[in-house]
């Protein structure tokens, strides 16, 4: 991998985030909300509203407002929330850390389940195991998040009563309790992703197992374990990396339903509350943080491709 490729990818990330910032700022300007009215209420006098607009720079041209917002954001200053008066940056970063913790736990659980299931189905293609994995995958894909979350809650928290139903406890305060509160939402998100990823692993492994170099490995008398784990899996997992990278976008922004059901104060839930309250600084900062995180994850996925497949080179 050359330095020129890394530079191109970094420039592309910057360009993407710049475009996202323009879109986000433009869309929030079109929302039917007045920041001054949101802060002072419907009964505020015209003079008070005008003073607030002048203080916030809302009476300036749109391009000047955008430039001021972007320059402040580049310095880590995302403004103050119109909903609670707190600084947006620290609040969203704390919420992001909770969402990332849930996402990492769900991803690890998903990989532990999905990869062996996909390999098992590929090795036993056309047999009962393959059909069983396919049925499980279709069922998992067809269930929306709130249905899966409800079933998990009903089974583990209501019927068996072995885990807490909702709530969030920081690991730094009580590690055991924090882990217990993360198990059910992690299972919910993992089950949703397992259906998707296991099918991808199965499909790619079937293709790889029918390649010439795998046939040559069989003819050499290598063991099944060595062929699967050392030769086939390395190439079979390459497309899965892309799928997992794309799933990060869902994990960070799309698990708001899971966060809402399990009462986890993550960034998805924070954005929903901000939209309901017309909290423009929080909406703008939240979307930008998600976009930046998603861009970094995709960049890391490209790097993983190079590490796993030496045939790939970037000029």
Image (tube, rainbow, N blue to C red):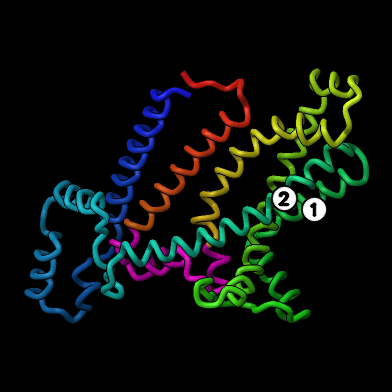
- Quadrant location of residue 207? top right
Question: Residue 58's image quarter?
Answer: bottom left
- Classify mark 1: helix, strand or loop: helix
The circle on residue 136 is: 1
> What is the distance, in whole Å, between disc 1 and disc 2 at their CAs?
7 Å
- In the image, which residues are magenta? 256-284
Task: Where is residue 102? Give x, y as percent.
Answer: 56, 62
Q: What number is the disc on residue 177?
A: none
Asked whether 55 or 117 is in front, the reply is: 117
Q: Position of residue 18 (x, y in %)?
A: 30, 41
Is there a contact, CB below 8 Å, between mark 1 and mark 2?
A: yes
Look at 65% across and 39% down and name the residue there. Answer: 240
Of residue 187 and residue 308, the one placed in the foreground of this image is: 308
Horizontal side of residue 94 vs 122, given as left or right: left
Q: Which residue is mark 2?
A: 195
Going from N to C along the chain, the mark reached first, 1 or 2, is: 1
Q: Looking at the picture, tell me which residue is in the foreground, 277 or 85.
A: 85
Q: Is residue 63 left or right of residue 222?
A: left
Verify whether residue 37 appears in magenta. no
**Structural crowding at the residue carrying mark 1, measured as other residues with C-alpha within 10 Å and reported as few (<14), some (14–19) or many (≥20):** some
**Residue sitting at x 56%, y 57%:** 103
Task: Tell me if residue 260 comes above or below residue 28 in the rendering.
Answer: below
């Amino acid at each position: 991998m050359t330095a020129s490729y890394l530079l191109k990818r970094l420039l592309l990330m910057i360009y993407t985030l710049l475009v996202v910032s323009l879109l986000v700022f433009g869309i929030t300007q079109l929302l039917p909300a007045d920041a001054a009215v949101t802060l002072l209420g419907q009964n505020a006098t015209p003079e008070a509203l005008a003073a607030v607009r002048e203080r916030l720079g809302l009476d300036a041209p749109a391009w000047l407002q955008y430039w001021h917002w972007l320059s402040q954001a580049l310095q880590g200053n995302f403004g103050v929330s119109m909903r609670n008066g707190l600084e947006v940056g620290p609040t969203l970063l704390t919420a992001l850390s909770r969402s990332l913790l849930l996402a990492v736990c769900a991803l690890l659980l998903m990989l532990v389940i999905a990869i062996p299931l996909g390999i098992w189905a590929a090795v036993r293609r056309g047999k009962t195991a393959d059909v069983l994995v396919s049925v499980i995958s279709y069922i998992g894909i067809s269930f929306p998040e709130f249905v899966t979350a409800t079933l998990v809650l009903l089974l583990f928290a209501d019927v068996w009563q072995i885990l807490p139903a909702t709530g969030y406890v920081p690991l730094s305060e009580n590690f055991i309790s924090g882990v217990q509160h993360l198990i059910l939402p992690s299972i919910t998100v993992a089950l949703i992703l397992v259906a998707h990823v296991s099918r991808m692993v199965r499909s790619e492994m079937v293709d790889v197992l029918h390649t010439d170099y795998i046939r040559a490995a069989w003819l050499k008398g290598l063991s099944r374990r060595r062929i699967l784990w050392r030769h086939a899996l390395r190439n079979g997992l390459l497309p899965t990396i892309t799928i997992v990278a794309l799933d990060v976008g869902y994990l960070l922004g799309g698990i708001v339903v899971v966060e809402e059901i399990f009462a986890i104060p993550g960034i998805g839930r924070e954005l929903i509350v901000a939209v309901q309250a017309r909290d423009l600084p929080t909406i703008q900062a939240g979307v930008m943080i998600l976009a930046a995180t998603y861009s970094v994850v995709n960049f890391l996925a490209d790097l993983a491709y190079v590490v796993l497949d030496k045939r790939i080179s970037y000029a």
